[in-house]
Amino acid sequence: MLKRYLLSPGPTPVPEKVLLDMAMPMIHHRTSEFSNIFKEVREGLKPIFGTRQDVLILAGSGTAAMEAAVVNTLNEGDKVLVVNAGKFGKRWVEIATTYGLDVITIDIEWGRSVKPDQVESKLIAHPEIKAVLVQASETSTTAYHPIEEIGKIVSLRDETLLIVDGITSVGVYETKMDEWGIDILITGSQKAFMLPPGLALIALSEKAWKFTEKSRIPKFYLNLKKERKSQLENTTSWTPAVSLIIGLKSVLEIMNKEGLPNVYKRHALCAEATRKGLMAMGFELLAKDIPSNSATGIVLPEGFDGGKFVKLMREKAGLTFAGGQDHLKGKILRVSHLGYHDFFDTIIALSSLEIGFSQ
Ligand code: PLP
């Protein structure tokens, strides 16, 4: 029998208590029982997002929240600036292009972080930019972008939104959406929230809600104005992912029992230990400027077949790591320290890699 360890940056392991809570018999969503749970989780999400705004809970993966951010606030022909520094930066480009936005990019070498003055220069050169779209943590390269500093620049401009994909940063880092000037912050359930995939979470600033008044891009399922109206009444426009929301209640209890500062500290410590351990083994980190506390990427030696290694570790040793995406396929390995992950998981990750690489 293989004992299985999930060490990829999403989906992440789900705590046993959460699995049990989600296994309770199904309840109907148009009941006070569900509304009470929904109200509790909506409140519980605010400190993790660092906002007084409502955090809307949608049924969908993280990309649904990315698409919702674009289609609810922007218009065909709007100029937007994308920090294109990995697979998920590219996804912003793809979504924005799909809806006819005029996309300009800051192209960053995979593994590097954008510099705030690069964003500032583009905003000066193109004052008509309506939104800056960026990842906080670019999971494909394990690099973190300096969101707080970017927020200081973008928030000076009334006509520009800062839209942040926090899919592998919310719940990993202390995030202060309101204070940092983030206008839209999104995440998904299968990362730091320790849940199965299926929930997309999104919060909008007052400034972003004003943009929704002017947005003419067609939307139906992802209509956030409609959704906000429903969620303010502790219900949803469509059938919600009931079991995941029950799981979210359980997750928030676990996170609050640990204490949010301790959650962030644990992520930082496991990340630091992973980086130091892998460097001590002689590996080069992929993220050169600001490595993310959600996962660590290493550059594999020339000629080493990363894809084969990941498969072998999964099938023979029960450990699921993540390989590289797009042009980094086979060339890097990513080790997660995200969500339901403690120091012993870090030790298992490091020791198994040491054994695996020595074979
Ligand atoms: N953005 C980031 C930073 C991610 O890590 C991911 C998923 O790994 C996504 C977007 C896409 O999310 P999903 O696959 O849940 O749609």
Image (tube, rainbow, N blue to C red):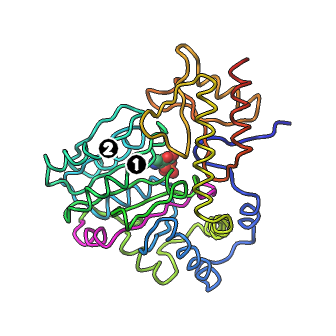
Disc 1 to disc 2: CB gap under 8 Å: yes
Q: Position of residue 209 (x, y in %)?
A: 31, 72
| Mark 1 CB within 8 Å of ligand 1 | yes
Residue drawn at x 25%, y 46% is 119
Quarter holding the N terminus? Answer: top right
Residue 17 location, quadrant: bottom right
Rendering quarter of residue 307: top right
Res 83 label: 2
On the rendered structure, is 338 left or right of 170?
right
- 125 above or below 204? above
Residue found 63% across the figure and 52% down from its top = 266
Q: Residue furthest top?
A: 303
In whole angstroms, how far apart are the C-alphas of marks 1 and 2? 8 Å
Tell me if residue 28 is in the magenta stretch.
no
Q: Which residues are magenta?
A: 193-215
Q: In the figure, is residue 198 to the left or right of 63?
A: right
Does the numbered disc 2 mark a residue whose Cβ is under 8 Å from ligand 1? no
- Mark 2 element type: strand
Q: Quadrant of the C terminus?
A: top right
Who comes first in sequence, dot 1 or dot 2? 2
At 61% from the left edge and 68% from the top edge, which residue is drawn? 245
Q: Amino acid at mark 2?
A: Val
Q: Does the magenta segment cover residue 203? A: yes
Q: Residue at x 63, y 58 (%)?
A: 195
* Residue that carries the numbered disc 1 in the rendered image: 135
User: Mark 1: which secondary structure?
Assistant: strand
Residue 184 vertical position relative to residue 347 in the rendered view, above or below: below
Position in image of residue 228 (x %, y %): 41, 76
Residue 138: x percent and y percent? 44, 43
